[in-house]
Amino acid sequence: MTGHQGLPGLTELAPETVEFTGARGGEYPLSWGQQMIWSSTRWLDDGDPYFNLPWALPISAPGGGAGDLAAVLRAVRRLVERHETLRTAYVETPEGTVQRVNRAGRLTVGVYEAAAKPMSAARALAADLAATGFDYAAESPIRCAVVLVRGRPRALALALSHLALDGWSLNLLAAEWPRLLAGDDLPEPVRQPLDQAAFEREGAGAARGAQALRHWRAGLVAAPRSMFDFPTREPEEPRFVRYGMESLAMAVAAETLAARCSVTTSSVLTVASAALLAALTGHRKAALQLIVSNRHDPRIRDMAGPAALDGLFVIDLAAGTFSDAVRRGHRQAMATYRNGNYDPSAVRAVRDEAAGRRGAELDLDVFFNDIRPDGRWPNLPPADPEDPGTLSTLAGRTRTFFVGAYPKVKARAFFATGAATATCEFFVLVDTAYLPRETAERMLLGLEALLVRAVTEEVPLDRVAEVCGVAPVRRPAGWTLIGDDWVCPPEGDGRTTGAPPLEMTRKVT
Amino acid sequence: MLRERLAELVSQASDGELAVADILAADSGLPALGVTSLTYLRLIDAIESEFGCDIDLDGPFLDTLDGLADHLTRQLDGR
């Protein structure tokens, strides 16, 4: 472990040791959700901390005061004992990678005294703890430290392996933490990743996985070979750029359209993203992968561990209006979410089969992720969308901003909501080998324009580009659309249709 | 009877956020009532396990109480 002398305002005290003994240990092949993250981590160099999750939790005792250190250490012990994922190692064996749950062990907990602002100190400490990659086979997937102010514990700094937890699990732990601190007796989780893996291999999960494979097979027949079948351009440095937007107008418009079409706002945003991308890239169909949390089954709701996978969503946008597409897309999205839990290696085989049949790899690297836990904006201020002035006034207050640029991301376009609850926070990431960075920002404003317009009039799908204010990609002379795929002339200008390979894979959500 | 039972399942799937009476009285689709994707998927699971049938969402779409009841009646009669 590295020293933390570099962190201003923090004094390192003697560390504590937490000894834990859980109800059971065991070894089993990885669950499907674990396999997904595992294969992503394998693309990185050993020790790369990209997938580490830094995190800080407040410590307050019942009655509002600070707790004592012993109570905090007890809560940490209970947390690790109740969630097997926090004491699991990932070991490569001749039969494949396995999850190895350690029944007992010890965890070193750093102790630091901060002059003030314990949560800021904990966040800095968490970032420091997360800066080193985990040794998945040998190391505990949780590192933690307690921040004291005048000797009283005030915050917990954590670094967690993404193999141990997904976003849903973090929320789960955040909800449990104050109760564990208070010494509450929480019911044991119904299912742990060991049980989940068994459910998928031998239990009812296997039949559901087989149904998901059928969904993938059908989707792979219908999907365009790529949404990005046009010549590449000189990429920017770093190559992938992400822009964000805060738009109350988009939230109000999405809610209005969702109510009108009897669908969810999530489906409205998914279809708007698909329609915009299809219009921009000259397609009559769009294929996206939706990030599926796989948490609707009550038995897996309180499981700490990774469960999210990508689901295939294909939508026909050849004719009709945007509202028609929203209604159709909602059905497609529900089928996608329903078929989101599958064996990733089986889907890889199905994708390879499809590539063989179509004579080309399928590029499905367009993603949509709605991260809102309940798919809503619960704190939206009241607004009257029927009043024509409302939406344009709100749109005047929309803000777009640059989020960041990244050298390697496994996506050509990535659409995502943000966590804001009182406005629509939305993000677009683009691969600048295909689309210039300005396009990312224009796409955000285009999505807002599309939804706002669709509230007052029916928007025909062939007018989406115009309404969004984006110029469709121009292909050189000779390129033709065959079925749903653009094909370049055999003796073209020497530029390939294929994408430059991404030798390493990451996703930003 | 089936309609009432389905309304109870919708209510349970929403963690009690939606009342059975409101679900029965509504003339709109389930999403307009406040049925989120998560609630909807839970509902489909609950129907499958209670009635022992398969509901394929790649097939015809079911987003109203009556639509679900009709579909289920046909499935159960077809056995």
Image (spheres, coloured by chain):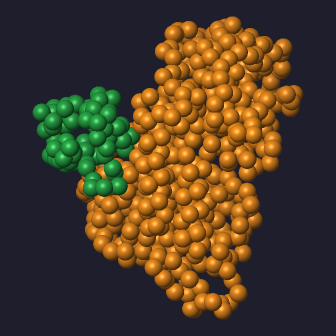
Chain colours: A orange, B green
**In x, y percent, where is residue A346?**
56, 51
View extreme (front): residue: B79
Left or right: A186 with respect to A394?
right
| Quarter of the image with the N terminus of chain A in it | top right
Q: Is residue A90 above or below residue A424?
A: above
Left or right: B57 with respect to A420?
left
Question: How many numbered callouts?
Answer: 0
Identify the residue at image location x=32%, y=61%: A328
Identify the residue at image location x=34%, y=64%: A325
Left or right: A130 with respect to A348?
right
**In x, y percent, where is residue A83?**
60, 22
Identify the residue at image location x=16%, y=44%: B77
**In x, y percent, where is residue A398?**
47, 56
Q: Is residue A504 above or below residue A158?
A: below
Q: Is residue A143 above or below residue A438?
A: above
The answer to whether residue A276 of the structure is visible from this angle is: no
Identify the residue at image location x=72%, y=30%: A89
Left or right: A417 with respect to A82?
left
Q: Quadrant of residue A496?
A: bottom right
Query: Considering depth in this image, is A22 or A432 the residue closer to the camera?
Result: A22
**In x, y percent, where is residue A509?**
59, 49
Query: Considering depth in this image, is A240 or A420 the residue closer to the camera?
Result: A240
The answer to whether residue A505 of the structure is visible from this angle is: yes
